[in-house]
Image: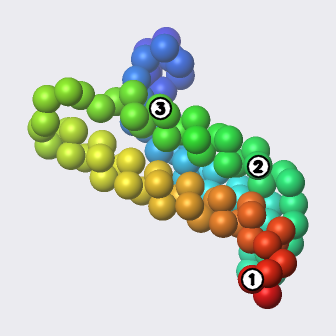
Amino acid sequence: MPYAVFNFRARSLIRGTVLVLASLLAAFLLSGFPRVHASWTVSFPALAALWGTFETVRCLRLKWSFYHGGVLLLLYMDVMALAMIFFLLLYPYAGWFQ
């Protein structure tokens, strides 16, 4: 395989980032945003986003460099996307918010 994106044993920032962003888009579509309704299928994008975050964490290096800083910025983006996905997953079940 010529590209690391398709080799699951190799580290790939592109694979992790695309997986998280595609999961965020899928969560928006499956939840029926802006009229969010209860849907258990949003759990699949949540799991995929967690896997994408793990793929991004694998790319961290021990010694600090600008590459390490860039990976940290991508991890912050992953955490924000995960927060939005889990909000879309859990908000319809929290009746006390309404």
Q: Is residue 39 left or right of residue 48?
A: right
Q: Which residue is mark 2?
A: 43
Per the image, label 2 sits on a secondary structure element best described as helix
Q: Is residue 16 left or right of residue 34?
A: left
Which quadrant of the structure image shows residue 83? bottom right
Per the image, label 3 sits on a secondary structure element best described as helix
What count of labels does the image hold?
Answer: 3
Per the image, label 1 sits on a secondary structure element best described as helix
Q: Nearer the viewer, residue 80 or 6?
A: 80
Residue 12 is at least partly visible in this image? yes
Label 2: few (<14), some (14–19) or many (≥20) C-alpha neighbours in 10 Å: some
Question: What residue is drawn where x is 42% and y is 36%?
Answer: 56
* Badge 1 amino acid: Phe
Is there a contact, CB below 8 Å, between mark 2 and mark 1? no
**Residue 94 % position (x, y):** 79, 72
Question: What residue is drawn where x is 36% and y is 49%?
Answer: 74
Which quarter of the rendered picture does the C terminus lie within?
bottom right
C-alpha distance separating marks 3 and 1: 34 Å
Q: Which residue is mark 1?
A: 97
Q: Nearer the viewer, residue 16 or 82?
A: 82
C-alpha distance separating marks 2 and 1: 21 Å
Is there a contact, CB below 8 Å, between mark 3 and mark 1? no
